[in-house]
Image (cartoon, rainbow, N blue to C red):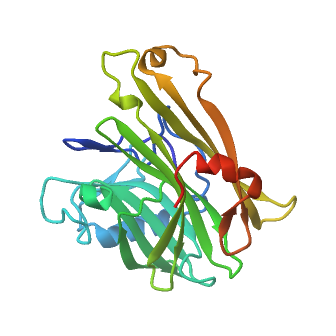
Amino acid sequence: MKGLRRVGAICALSVSVVVWGQTGRVAFNTAGGGAKAADIEAAVSLICPAGKMTRTKNGGVSGCNVCPRETDFYGDNASNWEMYAETPGHFASPQAENLLLSGTGCDSHANNFGGTFVFAVNVGKVRLVRYEQGLITDQCLKFGYADGRDGLVCRGGWFGQGEGDVYVFVVSFDAMGGSTHKNLIQSTDTTGTCALDGSQLVERSEIKELQLARKPGEASVTGLTITATLGKVKCGQLQTKSTPNAVKTYAIEFGFDGKRFTVAEASKAALARFTAE
């Protein structure tokens, strides 16, 4: 989940809020640490035509001013691909050195406006493995499976026609770079439907934080806590800065056995208030 670099991709009726909650970016992305600038540049050069790479003010690679071949809008000469996260790890296998580049701007609404490129890195040489269309990995935490592979737990979501759906999902990769994901929780917020009627009742909800649990002094993950808010409020209450008493905060805990996350018995009632897969 990196620094603040975008406000979403806007179309006629919907806005992608894959990395946004109602109050802005949540800074829980620790997945990108360790990505090498040289590997990132080599990877982007494989998907950007010669001379089409874009850069930030400090010279870092930021994307392409045309769409990569693998995306929906390749060849339309009007869109550009913006990169928002660079995540290294052992995703395809315990021995694999992989680099994930997540970006948006070159895919349709049906494909989440973007996706994640999966690369293999071998002694500084970078190879494109595949493009996972629709998979956004720019607000994630990285963890290790018992078999030595790395996985991600991420926040994503949508906003359209006044309703926002934000969810937490776990994603793993196979040997060919293909991804499998499972939703743990979904939070729905309808405060965007408020109009002139201050007495209108809407649902206010937000996924505020993800925190992985580890045993003291150990790197292996033992669980996950998702902090989320939920409550019914009147539209007139949204004009005040204070949080209405009806909006409650829930800390929903999951255990991790090295293969999967499972909701803790004590958190099942809280999870049931939200939507889980």
In the displayed structure, 105 sits above or below 12; it is: below
Q: Nearer the viewer, residue 224 or 84?
A: 224
Q: In the drawing, does residue 173 fall left or right of residue 66?
A: right
Q: Nearer the viewer, residue 246 or 73?
A: 246
Q: Residue 73 appears in which quarter of the rendering?
A: bottom left
Residue at 33% x, 73% y is: 46
In the displayed structure, 106 sits above or below 121; it is: above
Q: Is residue 67 visible?
A: yes
In the displayed structure, 61 sits above or below 28; it is: below
Residue 265: % across, % down: 75, 57
Q: Is residue 36 visible?
A: no
Residue 68: % across, % down: 25, 66
Q: Residue 161 appears in which quarter of the rendering?
A: top left
Residue 91: % across, % down: 56, 76
Q: Nearer the viewer, residue 171 or 84?
A: 171
Q: In the drawing, does residue 220 fall left or right of residue 207?
A: right
Residue 148: % across, % down: 68, 80
Q: Nearer the viewer, residue 250 or 148?
A: 250
Residue at 54% x, 73% y is: 172
Residue at 53% x, 38% y is: 206
Residue at 26% x, 55% y is: 109
Q: In the drawing, does residue 269 fall left or right of residue 59?
A: right
